[in-house]
């Protein structure tokens, strides 16, 4: 297992550039529309209304829009969350040898036997039960992802009030 650490890259020139490029009229801050443009530029998707609302709600009381500092902050949180999600997806895919979209107990056991061959089966059974949060006997990506989080909640890092 390698590359599991989360890279916090901090400020990158292109995040800075995206701010300037999407700040229509060089106001020095991003409006709702500007923010959407910036996210499309950096992440290649249009943010949902809920996402834009929660970001804008966190700044609107004190400022007319997102300042550069705040923007860099929000973007690095988003990047870390996205990177983490991709890593978990890769690990799940590595376990899911037949690309079924879920892990049976057998898949799970095989993966453990490779990583930790001496682990007693009862430990694997316990781990399986713990990860299988809806107790349907299979580990879906959702089960797997929430088990991998260890309290790492990507949304709680974004201010919501
Ligand atoms: Ca399940």
Image (cartoon, rainbow, N blue to C red):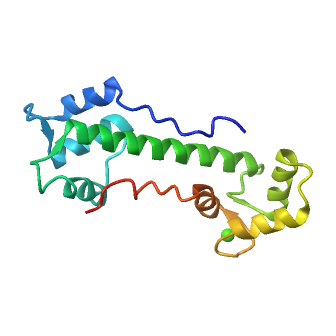
Q: Is residue 83 left or right of residue 55?
A: right
Q: Which residue appears at 69% of the width and 35% of the height?
A: 2
Q: Quadrant of residue 14?
A: top left
**Where's residue 49, x and y in %?**
26, 58
Quadrant the N terminus occupies: top right
Q: Quadrant of residue 128?
A: bottom right
Q: Which residue appears at 70% of the width and 64% of the height?
A: 139
Is residue 155 depicted above or below 19 in this figure? below
- Residue sticking out furthest to the top: 13
Q: Which residue appears at 62% of the width and 59% of the height?
A: 141
Q: Quadrant of residue 43?
A: top left
**Where's residue 18, x and y in %?**
26, 31
**Where's residue 99, x and y in %?**
72, 51
Q: Nearer the viewer, residue 97 or 150?
A: 150
Q: Is residue 137 left or right of residue 147?
A: right
Quadrant the C terminus occupies: bottom left
Q: Is residue 125 left or right of residue 146?
A: right
Q: Nearer the viewer, residue 116 or 89?
A: 116
Q: Which residue appears at 53% of the width and 48% of the height?
A: 85
């Amino acid at each position: 297992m390698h590359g599991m650490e989360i890279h916090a890259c901090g400020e990158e020139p292109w995040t800075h550039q995206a701010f300037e490029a999407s700040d229509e009229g060089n106001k020095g801050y991003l409006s709702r529309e500007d923010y959407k443009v910036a996210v499309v530029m950096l992440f290649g998707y249009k943010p949902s209304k809920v996402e834009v609302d929660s970001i804008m709600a966190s700044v609107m009381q004190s400022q007319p829009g997102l300042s550069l500092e705040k923007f860099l902050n929000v973007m690095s949180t988003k990047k870390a969350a996205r990177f983490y999600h991709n890593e978990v997806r890769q690990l799940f895919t590595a376990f899911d040898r037949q690309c079924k979209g879920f892990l049976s107990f057998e898949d799970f056991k095989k993966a453990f036997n490779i990583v930790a061959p001496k682990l007693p089966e009862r430990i694997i059974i316990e781990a399986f039960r713990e990860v299988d949060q809806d107790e349907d006997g299979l580990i879906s990506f959702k089960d797997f992802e929430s088990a991998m989080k260890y309290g790492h909640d990507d949304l709680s890092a974004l201010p919501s009030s």
